[in-house]
Image (cartoon, coloured by chain):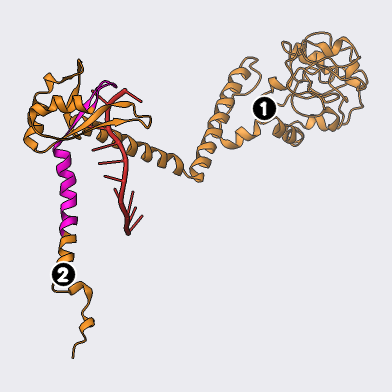
DNA sequence: GTTGAGCGTT
């Protein structure tokens, strides 16, 4: 026994008359629009003053004009183009083929099929451009690389910079010929070239490499006479003669930290008050760190010994030796100021 | 100022 209403809607064998009509309408609708297009011509370049009547009057000679739709702004003024619908395609063809002879209101107008090739090409180009923009935007949003990539990149950059720094240093160090050739740069070396690192490392290295300095010597009020020796004879030249065995150059070692230290380097090449910076055998000097004169209140500050530009002549200019008064800035060249 | 706008959905 089959209930009348049990049949699923989707398999209904027949449609009512009304349904059929609806279907016809739906089916007809789309083709109708297409037909509208193929029987419509676009008319561009109209005068604002051109009326529908004028347009109809012009296009009537190519066939039966169904309608003319001049596009207007809300205020009613013409936008300068119109759609002319013919009742058949042949009229459109005739009309389009005669494009050279369309003059309305004494003005040449453009007549093309609705959605003609030029229009479609323009639309296509526009679509392509939009798609391209979207693609680009998407890429930018996603980002060109991951965080890891960035880190890798920066590490690489750092190493490269360190290497180039080392190269520069090796070049400038070669001037006095006292230092050994700088070894090939590696990250560890790059780190060691950091002034702070040198400050930290030198005490240890000095102790290990220069046992001579471990010998106790009394403080030398008046400064380290080695400065003179340094200026004239290089590191170690002062040894023995004037009471201080420190080769008074401009290394990174605070003088006061060394047993037997004179308590201050008057050489003019010191960075810090009271911090004689003995040059370190085998280590490149730090030209950029030099040039600080002796400081007031420190034994080295009043050192009479330094009257010449000293070991680091050229940037310190020996200011520190001129007076025991307030510190002068090292010609503006010093990037490292005391305290 | 040379290509509309409505209809109404996934």
Q: Colour of chain A?
A: orange
* Residue that extends furthest to the bottom in the rendered view of this protein: A1
Front in this rendered view, residue A312 or A5: A5
- Which label belongs to residue A283? 1
Mark 1: give few (<14), some (14-19) or many (20+) Cα within 10 Å: some
Which is more toward the observer, A151 or A214? A151
Locate residue A178, reporting x and y percent. Answer: 66, 19
Residue A246 x, y percent position in the rendering? 81, 24
Magenta region: A24-51
Any mark on residue A128, and which?
A: none
Residue drawn at x 63%, y 19% as measured from the top left = A173
Q: Is residue A119 above or below residue A308?
A: below
- Which image quarter is the C terminus of chain A in? top right
Quadrant into which the N terminus of chain A falls? bottom left
Discs 1 and 2 carry the same chain letter: yes
* Residue A218 colored in magenta in the image: no
The tag earlier along the polypeptide, 1 or 2, is 2
Residue A201 seen from this side: yes
Whether residue A143 is visible here, answered yes or no, is no
Q: Within 10 Å of the Cα at label 2, are there few (<14), some (14-19), or many (20+) other Cα atoms?
A: few
* Residue underneath mark 2: A16
Q: Left of A53 or right of it: where is A201?
A: right
Please tell me which residue lies in front, A47 or A238.
Answer: A47
Q: Nearer the viewer, residue A157 or A279?
A: A157
Chain colored red? B
Given the image, what chain letter belongs to the residue carrying mark 1? A
User: Residue drawn at (81%, 13%), measured in percent from left and top?
Assistant: A228
């Amino acid at each position: 026994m089959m209930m009348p209403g049990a049949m699923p809607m989707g398999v209904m064998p027949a449609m009512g008359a009304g349904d059929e009509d609806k279907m016809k309408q739906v089916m007809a609708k789309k083709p109708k629009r297409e037909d509208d297009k193929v029987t419509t011509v676009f008319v561009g370049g109209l005068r604002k003053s051109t009326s529908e009547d004028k347009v109809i009057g012009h296009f009537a000679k190519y066939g039966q004009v169904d309608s003319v739709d001049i596009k207007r702004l809300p205020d009613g003024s013409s936008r300068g183009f119109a759609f002319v619908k013919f009742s058949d395609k042949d009229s459109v063809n005739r009309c389009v083929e005669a494009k050279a002879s369309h003059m309305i209101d004494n003005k040449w107008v453009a007549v093309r099929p609705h959605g003609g090739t030029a229009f479609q090409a323009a639309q296509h180009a526009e679509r392509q451009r939009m798609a391209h923009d979207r693609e680009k935007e998407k890429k930018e949003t996603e980002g060109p690389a991951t965080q890891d990539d960035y880190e890798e990149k920066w590490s690489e950059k750092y190493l490269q910079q360190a290497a180039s720094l080392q190269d520069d240093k090796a070049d400038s160090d070669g001037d006095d010929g006292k230092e050994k050739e700088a070894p090939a740069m590696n990250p560890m070396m790059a780190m060691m070239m950091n002034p702070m690192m040198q400050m930290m490392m030198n005490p240890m290295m000095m102790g290990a490499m220069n046992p001579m300095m471990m010998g106790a010597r009394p403080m030398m009020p008046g400064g380290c006479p080695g400065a003179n020796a340094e200026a004239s004879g290089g590191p170690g030249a002062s040894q023995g003669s004037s009471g201080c065995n420190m080769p008074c150059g401009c290394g990174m070692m605070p003088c006061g930290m060394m047993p037997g230290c004179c308590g201050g380097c008057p050489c003019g090449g010191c960075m810090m008050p009271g911090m004689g910076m003995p040059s370190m055998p085998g280590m490149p000097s730090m030209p950029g760190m030099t040039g600080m004169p002796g400081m007031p209140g420190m034994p080295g500050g009043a050192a009479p010994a330094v009257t010449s530009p000293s070991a680091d002549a050229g940037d310190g200019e020996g200011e520190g030796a001129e007076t025991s008064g307030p510190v002068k800035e090292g010609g503006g060249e010093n990037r490292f100021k005391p305290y």
